[in-house]
Image (cartoon, helix red, strand yellow):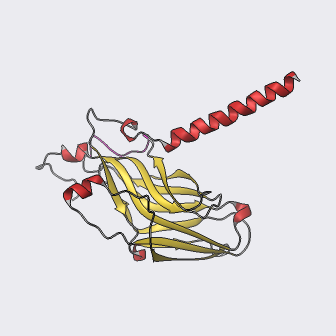
Amino acid sequence: MKRTVILIVLITLLFAGGSLFAQQVNNIQADQLGQDTAQQALQEVSISRFEDPGFWRVYIPLDSGLITHRRLEGGPMDKEPIEAEVAAGIEEPDDYVLGVRTEFFRRGVTTIYVEAIRPLPVPGIAKTLSVWVAGRNFNHELYAVIRDQFGNQGQLFMGRMNFSGWRRMTTAIPPNIMQRNVHYPHLAGIEILGFLIRPAMLETFGSYYVYFDDLRVMTDLFTEESRDPDDMIDGW
């Protein structure tokens, strides 16, 4: 009897701890991430709205399946405009999303790549990265692929796409990623190379659809705003 009670308590604590961890991940505080300056000028910036599929390419190993992408009209209804753009009167086209369709040959371990034709630079010191995704309730894992100014690449886990409809998936930029060097002030921030999907092996069958919209970054622009206008750029 005592063993049963102890087991129930442990299971309860385990689920409670898991819920708490998930809540902390979903409520990332951008102003508390990797602060390396006395002041911060946090600003949400839209990096890509996925309006033109020509700026993206998709691929999968040839022995795993066939893949294609296109743009489709629509988007998440819960998406809110960026306050700074509204205040400045900036109106950017936002009518389409990027759709990716994969036809799996068979069940197995594989990887789906959604890659930008050219790296997408992020101004300032990035704190968080988010993108709206419709993942069709599969247990596939989504990663953001980034690169710092010194050529080092990394993959940031954004979560599983086991949900219905649109959801904004967010990840924090770890402080150990080199975004600023005191000797090279013009080399700051990161570049976004695209996304990587690791499908759940037991769910790699039939057709898989996934949609992307509005890639945004919460970034600290303090170093950009405080840079001397007459400073030289070491790009020659």
Q: Is residue 182 magenta?
A: yes
Residue 99 pos. (x, y %): 51, 72
**Residue 164 drawn above or below residue 98:** above
- Give the quadrant of residue 222: top left
The x, y position of residue 11, in whole percent, is 74, 33
Examine the rendering and report whether any part of residue 148 can be seen: yes
Establish if 55 lies above or below 46. below
> As rendered, which of 69 and 64 lies closer to the eye?
69
In the image, 228 versus 3, the foreground residue is 3
* Quadrant, the C terminus: bottom left
Query: Can residue 149 be seen by looking at this rendering?
Result: no
The residue under the point 47% across, 50% down is 170
> Which residue is at 33% across, 50% downward?
189
x, y percent for residue 224 = 22, 47
Tag count: 0
Position of residue 62 in the picture relative to residue 34 (left or right): right
Chief SS of the magenta region: loop
Rendered view: 228 above or below 32: below
**Part of the protein shown in magenta:** 175-184
| Quadrant (top left/top right/bottom left/bottom right) for the N terminus | top right
Q: Nearer the viewer, residue 55 or 93?
A: 93
Q: Is residue 154 magenta?
A: no
